[in-house]
Amino acid sequence: MTETAVGQRSPSNHLLRRDVRFLGNILGEVLVHQGGRELLEHVEKIREMSKALRAEYLPELYEGFIHTVKNLEPGIRHQVIRAFAIYFQLVNIAEQNHRIRRKRDYERSAGEAVQPGSIESVIQNLKEKNLPIDEVKDMLADISLELVMTAHPTEATRRDVLDIHKRIADEVMELDNPTLTFREREKLREKLTNEVLTLWQTDELRDRKPTVLDEVRNGMYFFHETLFEVLPNVYEELERCLEKYYPEVQWHVPTYLRFGSWIGGDRDGNPSVTADVTWQTLKMQRNLVIYKYENSIREISRQLSFSTTIVNVTDELLESIRVDSENVELRTVEPWTNDKEPYRVKLRYMLQKLQNMREDEFKGTKQRYHTVADFTADIEILDRSLRHHYADFVANSYLRKLIRQVELFGFHLAALDVRQHSKEHENTMSELLANAGVCSDYAALSEQEKIELLNGLLSGSKALLTEDMKLSESSQECINVYHTIYKAQQEFGVGCITSYLISMSEAASDILEVMVFAKEAGLFRRGEDGKVVCTLQAAPLFETIDDLHAAPEIMETLFNLPIYRECLASMDDLHEIMLGYSDSNKDGGMVTANWELRVALNELTRTAKAHNVRLKFFHGRGGALGRGGMPLNRSILAQPPHTIGGGIKITEQGEVLSSRYSMKGIAYRSLEQATGALITGAYLSRNPAQESSVETQWEEIMRGISVDAQTKYQDLIFRDPDFMTFFKESTPLPEVGELNIGSRPSKRKGSDRFEDLRAIPWVFAWTQSRYLLPAWYAAGTAFENFVNGDPKRLETLRTMYREYSFFATLIDNLQMALGKADLMIARQYAGMIGDESVKKRIFTQIEEEYAKTKEMILTITGQEDILDNVPVIQESIRLRNPYVDPLSYMQVQLLTELRALRAQNGDDAELLREVLLTINGIAAGLRNTG
């Protein structure tokens, strides 16, 4: 496999093509070594035929291609699938490396010029706008971005395979080293050959579903490998730029960017996430962050060789050493015997106090750190002493970064969000109130009656739970979670868990129920001064279109409750609200979901402002276009600026985590761009453009387009009785559930209803079969209905594309979806449908809507072809398709054989394995799963 499948044909990309060719040649050698020349010849023949078919569709060529694929002997077929899948893994590594290379090349060639999209470009822009220092300070104090890792099963690649990928990436980057000798290059090639061979001989499929704690370890990998180092570097760059353009101030930027996690806390539909698992998760996170601090302390100790025979350290440092020597026994840490080097003496005690945090026997003693403040105080003693003898550069280089790491990661690494379905709370509340003799049938109450009852329980002082109360296992588990949160806040700090997310929030009572449970556990109480102290926020998750419509009224009801406002006052009148991009899309389609989310953002912000409440919106985006996926900086700038004042949270999951955070250079660039977008958004929110009457007209137009799109979408998805048959039979949906990529079931309940299907397998299956239907379907009809043959209306849409940012983003996302979709391949999948009339009727409908959507978008944008506006991506898709196609054709053949066998109550483990291998390969080829 020797040709590039990526990149444009410009000289600037010759290094990318070199790397792809280099890795492709190595893979070819490995194929010959492992499967003989015959294997390589099969792979090359299929690749060449696929390329030719893409270049020009000829019936005889197509028949020959299908014949070749269908007549592969099973043993060879298995290896051919793996060859294409691994080729894409290598191509993806080369592309990621090239992104880092491009940034470095730009910085090297630009000299002192400022890179567009960088932090410096944004700060320079503020200075050019003559923004005063005080306003810059206020802006930085207000901005907030929390990126939340989730365990949603969209990462089809095993952790072991990702480790090999990282080693290959590091070694490929060495190819750019101009000082390498001929022998060193040969040695590097040998190492890469070994890694590709190891990749070939490593099973890319998991033999079992990962446990929740496996998923926790996977998430922690990114903290260990990149984020612990990269996050402080982003802050350091922001402070450098501020000091450059606003030198009058010594800057220490408030904490505005951090990572959180759902992994080990998200129990919605996942019975494996118990209170004990949540506790174990927090312990694992603390152990990792302590380990990272220990490494930092050891590294700093190697640097701080200052001797009191030459410098005068502070009395404060000497006194702290004396206190430590009286209280801390150096058990597992070797003492520093040279007392003329006090920094190293002090650091030994600090190391021991960190290690003692892992042992329960040291709780309550002076032999360990109990709070982050204790640890920070010791670091600051070192910092002040260094500056006392003018070792400022050393303090800035080592201690400043450690202080920032402690501010970011504390002793809990990342804030853990807890999530549960609202129905579970209602069931538990019903049982609890019945047992307490308060209400015999809570579930039967009207919403107003529930609110009055819950309001009274929150306002009163009486506890509902008693020691002898017997509850069902599920209800007891639900309540145990709150006690675990209380215990965790005492042990790991209040910041370890502060948000409790409620899936399918449909009423104000859904939020109040969580607050009553929090009160029972001590997370909501009155202090000695009579004021409410609340350390856990109930955050509603509005997911469906109906829920988005109801959201402003639900929040209005809560804001009007005095006891709830007291609770909010203890949280600085900041309320978190989560919006679901996945279920809203699944419910109403791409156009409607995007519009309704925007309307909800605006209406909720208006409602909160009327009550002097700030909102922190949590955007539940996935990696795929059908689930709100887009680059991080674009997802921030896509929000109406006035809605980001209270901060933003965004989910980061599955393949997005790997693509953004597995390599330091890419992680840094992603977070740098996110910082720039955040500051830009904050500036725009403080300096809003005057809303024009024409924009109001455009919003009215979008409202009508959204209604038409929703009708068209739901006519197929909800109102066509044969749709679910079409979906299940023409996509690998049933088999996706057998790919062991997540601990969570693919359905909320054990049913086959569309409503109970999770959004992730919904999008995953459509992506695999190349329809990408959730990301574009119904847009064409909605646009066509609006234009209705009127040239003036068409011109209005063209103007909206040029001047209305929401509409431009919508159109460009639709372009991306259409560019990645391929109905020629999708037709092959439709061939698996048993009922010919169902297949013909629904596929024709999809085909016509695709053509209509493509035509409308080209007419609106004035382009000749889809993605002419982003030729890099257009070319990448064009060059990747011939390599993905063989995997798609083989997947259809394998699914057909497997399903026929299972219809006769048979099965074939090897056949299933080959199906799952094609799923992995297509995911790698499309760089997208769910």
Image: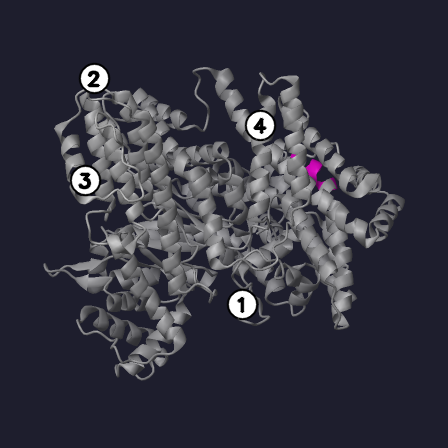
**Secondary structure at numbered mark 2:** loop
- Residue 678: x and y in percent read 38, 37
Please tell me whether residue 555 belongs to the stretch shown in magenta: no
Q: Which of marks 1 and 3 is nearer the N terminus?
A: 3
> Mark 2 packing: few (<14 Cα in 10 Å), some, or many (20+)?
few
**Residue underneath mark 4:** 173
Q: Earlier in the sequence, mark 4 or mark 1?
A: 4
Foreground: 894 or 111? 894
Inspect the image, locate mark 2, and give the three-letter code of the amino acid beneath it: Ile
Q: How far apart are marks 3 and 2 (CA)?
A: 24 Å
Q: Earlier in the sequence, mark 4 or mark 2?
A: 4
Q: Earlier in the sequence, mark 4 or mark 3?
A: 4
Is 866 left, or right, of 40 in this rendering?
left
Secondary structure predominantly adopted by residues drawn in magenta = helix
Q: Distance between the residues labelled 1 and 3?
A: 58 Å
Q: Do the residues labelled 3 and 2 touch (CB within 8 Å)?
A: no
Q: Which of marks 3 and 2 is nearer the N terminus?
A: 2
Is 86 left, or right, of 104 in this rendering?
right
**Secondary structure at numbered mark 3:** helix
Inspect the image, locate mark 1, and give the three-letter code of the amino acid beneath it: Asp
> Which residues lie in the magenta part?
875-882
- Residue 278: x and y in percent read 38, 59
Q: Do the residues labelled 2 and 1 touch (CB within 8 Å)?
A: no
Q: Distance between the residues labelled 4 and 3?
A: 46 Å
Q: Which of marks 4 and 2 is in front?
A: 2
Residue at screen point 15% across, 26% down:
314
**Residue underneath mark 2:** 310
**Residue underneath mark 1:** 756
